[in-house]
Amino acid sequence: MANIAEAVDIFHLRELAKKRLPRAMFDSLDHGSEDDVAYRHNRDVLDRIKLVHRVLNDVSDRDPSTDLFGHRQALPLIIGPTGITSWVSYRGEVALARAAAEAGIPFVLTSTTATPMETVLEQGGGRQWYQAIIWRDVEAALSGIIRARDAGFETLILTVDSTIPYNRPYDQRNRLKFPLKLRPSHFLEPLRHPGWTFTTPVRYLLNERRLPQMVNIDVPKGVSRGAGSPFWVKADSLTWDFLRRVRALWPGNLVVKGILHPDDAVKAIDCGANGIVVSNHGGGTNDAAPAPLEMLPGVAAAVAGRVPVLVDSGFRRGSDVVKAIALGADAVLVGRATLYGLGAGGQAGAQRAVSILGNEIRRMMGVLGVSELSSLGRDHLMLPGDLAHLARDAAPWKGPNLALASPELEPVTTP
């Protein structure tokens, strides 16, 4: 195994994970939908946002902690839900939960993982949230939510932007389906990656007598759990009434994930949501979607501080996180960043990923001249629209122009 402690950034962890994981597994976690346009665009938007530093401020004592849902946490980060976790590393859900607990941040367990949710809660520790994906058998999905409630998860994340089957060419080319069904062509690659093979699938077979299965989803008796089963069809008929139904079942914090339009954020709050995640699913569902950072200012303005606004998709640097906070986010969910760490070196790799991001956040705060995250704001940002404003008016910078993608595009806002 590579010396994880020597990984210098998330991109380095990605390289290490690529070496260790079979190609089909790495391709599945490393790509989005269709042509990867949205996946790449998420990074392009982040790269185009510039941070303006302020000087001669005492930054000898920098505090990157934040309050979220009544808890003080060490960093403005959450390890987000990722469905391939069980295959990236043996009981990877527990490893990620422990990495989050070590860092003093929440971890989100998704319903499509292979370790029982109760085991993850017990062995992972820390603050744990649960993400529900809704299948066409809505009652089975709701029973999973009730199970998570009774198990004691702190917060429920309801993902609402993946009700249509994915169109992911890399998985199709690699003949990879989830729940995973191994084919003869899949066995050659693991032989080339013994470090992963003997610590993940072989370990499952030795310890649990089976390969990973989605044990947190209540499949009715007599219904096949295998790949291609009619059960694994997403629920494409959900409405806002369904969100109200979930609200009635869940007594804790309810966060709606997959929001891009400000009007949808307002509707979610009206239906009882305690938080919003501005997200395009990491570019995994709608390949023509705008980047969440483009839509964040409009959503934050519409929410107007009533509930926390979170964001995900494309975050690889601490400076990315700082940009999101300055644009109005309360915290950032990271998915692939910690998966790269998990794939490179299990729990130690995931911990290294969070440590890298935390160190980069602290460093960038010092560079910008701020000691607390609450000091970040529009004055620290230079957006593409700002440059166009200067060119048009030949005048000093007059203030916010939140057009991230083009000088001609203003953010969507509600009246």
Image: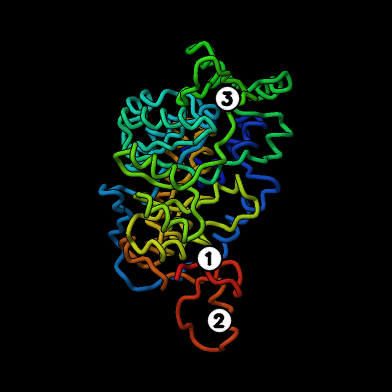
Residue occupying image coordinates x 41% and y 73% = 379
Picture coordinates of residue 27 (x, y %)?
65, 37
Please tell me whether mark 1 sits on a helix, a strand or a loop.
Answer: loop
Compare marks 3 and 2 and give the one earlier in the sequence. Answer: 3
Position of 173 compared to 13: left or right?
right
Which residue, as the protein is rendered here, is positioned at the far front? 241
Position of 264 compared to 123: left or right?
right
Please tell me whether mark 2 sits on a helix, a strand or a loop.
Answer: helix
Q: Can residue 364 be seen in this view?
A: yes
Picture coordinates of residue 414 (x, y %)?
46, 67
What residue sits right under mark 3 in the picture? 196
Report how far apart the C-alphas of labels 1 and 2 lie in the structure: 15 Å
Q: Which of marks 3 and 2 is in front?
A: 2
Task: Find out whether the residues at labels 3 and 1 contact each other: C-beta distance under 8 Å.
Answer: no
Establish if 237 lies above or below 114: below
Disc number at residue 68? none
The number of callouts visible is 3
**Amino acid identity at mark 3:** Trp
Disc number at residue 49? 1
Compare marks 1 and 2 and give the one earlier in the sequence. Answer: 1
Looking at the rendering, in which quadrant would you find the C terminus? bottom left
**Amino acid identity at mark 1:** Ile
Position of 229 compared to 130: left or right?
right
Tell me where residue 225 sits by quadrant.
Answer: top right
